[in-house]
Image (cartoon, grey):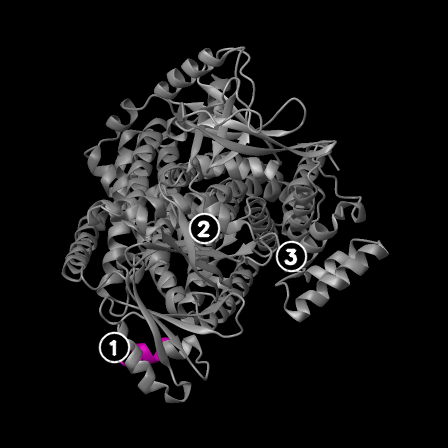
Amino acid sequence: MAGKHIWKLVLSALIVAFSVSYLIPLKDRDFSEYLRENSDSEAFYTLLERAETQVEEGSVQSIYLGLKNIATEERLDLSEHFPDIRLDPSLYNLDKKNKILLTELKKRSEAKLKRGLDIAGGISVTLQVDPAELENIQAGERREKLSKAIQIIEDRINTYGVSEPVVREVGEDRIEVQIPDLNTKDNPDLLDNIKKPARLDFREVHLTARPGIDPKPLGYTAMTMVRDTAQGEYEETLYIKNIPALTGKYVTKAVPVQNELGGFEVSLTFDDEGKDRFGAITTKLAGIGRLAIVLDGKLTSAPNVQSAILDGRAELTGNYTQLEAIEQANILNNPLEFSLEIAELYEVGPTLATDSINSALFAAKVGVVCITIFMLIYYMVGGVIALASVLLNIAIVLGILASFDAALTLPGIAGIILTVGMAVDANILIFERIREELRAGKSLKAALTGGFQKVFSTIFDANVTTLLVSVVMLSYGTGPVKGFGLTLAIGVVTTVFCALIISKMLLELVIETDALKKFAMLSIVKNPKADFLKYRAPAFAISWTIVLIGISGVYLKKDSIFGIDFTGGDEVILSFDERIDTTDILAYAEQNDLGEVTAQYITPLGADIEILKVQTPFEQGATVAQALQSGFPAANLDIQGENKIGPTVGDEIKFNAAMSIGISLALILLYIAFRFEIGYGIGAIVATIHDILLTIGVFVLVPGHQFTAPMIAAILLIVGYSLNDTIVVFDRIREELQMRPTSKLKEVINIAINAVISRSLLTSITTLLAAGSLLIFGTGVINDIAFTFTIGILTGTFSSIFIASPVFFWWHKGDRRSVETSHDVAPEYEWQAGSKASE
């Protein structure tokens, strides 16, 4: 094996191994069984049996809490039974040590890739604002403060944008938080981290007076902090000034850092006013006093001030573990204005009906089988290589997502679907280029080299534009927009890697070893010579007419096209004697025209009963509840409560989604203008806007569809697909302009479209196989997403030919000279290099 293959093989193996390591285990393992398998200590087995007994008796809720309580009561160091897990040697606090160990063991026993609320459910907590803190506040200001608190809580939970929590207003002073694939039995501190106000004060310590010795000075309060050392814990009580010298509102950034001794701290950066205030107080205390750090009313540390600190930075040193430092920095970056108390706590089932989940899984399997059969029949050996490359691509994407502790939700799945589409498309581009080289009379090895040389710029530019979109979504988006952006960004990088490294390596191996002597493949279109631009005017007019009709439909139906995710609504809590499948509830609501209805089962923590939660449009809760009581009399449904709920897709998410698309289009215009020419950029932007508007219009015009939260991901999916299609066509136009210096612009555009029409049709067929299977076999919101994506596939293929290319043609008024004079930098191909060498 040649050296050029060895490094590719090693690199590919390392990346795949890294990714797969993050995917194992694929499913959660029983915690007790995992502990038994990973400890050979008989003493620990005895502790574990005691914890299991406590769970069976109901005195504790989980093995995790049972072991934690036993270790706390008897002052045991559980790490002695797991010598392979290395903890921070500077950690002396036994409770912290056991908590970190058990948390790590629990994490190792669980599947790395979590499932979202829509697929697996999770926990639901309703947080109540202290009424005293909302007194004398006007209703408008109260709503504003509650909206800000909702965003802060989501930021705390959704650090990377991939956990997809639900955070929304309930009533006038409560916030509902749903977190996927978690429970409070094994994560008891989770809710504390969510609801902490994160009030940070820097206060002076009295220079001379000490509690227990001196009387309390006026304006000071005695506060105690716990110090953790190798000799054990000890308490120190100090007189702390009541009025802070500086508060956390001046902190612009908090970052967890490791100090010289290996411990962890939180590094703070102040704004300009904070820098001046901190400089003043440290100058005052330099060499003579201490500055207390008080967090949420608790004294965490009181370091001596050695000298004035004038650079606007400070460190919080509170004997943090790494996890605590990360959590503390996250909380300080997102401080709440008021305290919150837990009003209700539930375990919740998946928001998608079981039938929807099962049908989606079945549809996905059908789609994969159809694509596999198609690729194998059409490309034969090439199809095997393409499928191997795509499967490795998916494994790498999922592994990287797992390394981010991502929760796999519908928006994330949409990003993976687009990644699969891009990966298949990249391989089709490669194979079609090799076909062209073979038709030109080249040998198989030469055709492989030439094909990859010419396809590189196409794959590079198509994926860079999509990467720009994903980076903007990741930077400016929130909620499902941010999660989709991260998934797509990872997918773009892995697609380029798998296409240009893995696929090329596999092809080189089978060709250079003579395992493949002939690259056989079918042909869907042979030597097409259609005059596509001949139909540009009617095609343009018809499609934009549909767009205008669709926009009119959006306006006319504006009060009914948005679902509860966007508008909020009523929430009815029902008890029951006989459980009704959520699929039956949704079907009954549809049959009886009850409007949009969602149903979810919840279980109060510590209770053995389930409660049915039904969400409806505003003022429809009682009506729907009565209808369900009539439709399912055996269930004996009884109304236990009713609330008004806010939207899960708030104004900020909608604004950020629109802003993300706007900024993305601007960046794409700049990139294409730099890499190609401004006319190409204008064509790409117009085509993308056309595809978004046409898809939304058709979606609204077809009865029975409403915009829900997952639809944001479906629309973003179309942006990526449309751009990919358009760049492929434009890259070929750019190439043909150089290869045909005497041809007219119209002729060149037609030749370019004819050259890539086979690729466009093949890509559309493969992606339609996936989307079509979801459309046929999927139900509920899965069907809506598939319907939207199916429209997007068709419009994307159409617009790259009949919108983007004609706009480019019209921009230059049909004159190729304006294309050539407006962009001096152009790619050079091997035929140019050869001609220059012969001159």
Question: Observer-nearest residue: 412 or 81?
Answer: 81
Q: Is mark 3 on a helix, strand or loop?
A: helix
- Magenta stretch, main secondary structure class: helix
In the image, residue 821 sits, relative to residue 55, either above or below, namely: above
Instruction: Determine the secondary structure under disc 2.
Output: helix
Q: What stretch is highlighted in magenta?
A: 586-592
The quarter in which the N terminus is drawn is: top right
Residue 65 is labelled as 3
Q: What residue type is labelled 2?
A: Gly
In whole angstroms, how far apart are the C-alphas of marks 3 and 2? 37 Å
From this viewpoint, is residue 182 visible?
A: yes
Q: Does the magenta stretch include residue 765?
A: no
Mark 3–mark 2 contact, CB under 8 Å? no
Q: Which residue matches tag 1?
A: 623
Measuring 22% from the left and 46% from the top, which residue is drawn there?
Answer: 136
Q: Is mark 1 on a helix, strand or loop?
A: helix
Residue 432 at least partly seen: no
Q: What residue type is labelled 1?
A: Thr
Residue at 30% from the left image edge and 65% from the top image edge: 643
Circles 3, 1 touching at the beta carbon (< 8 Å): no
The residue that disc 2 covers is 415
Q: Measure the C-alpha gap from mark 1 to mark 2.
A: 38 Å
Circle 2 packing at 10 Å, graded few (<14), some (14-19), many (20+), is many
Count of marks placed on residues: 3
Foreground of the two, 770 or 561: 561
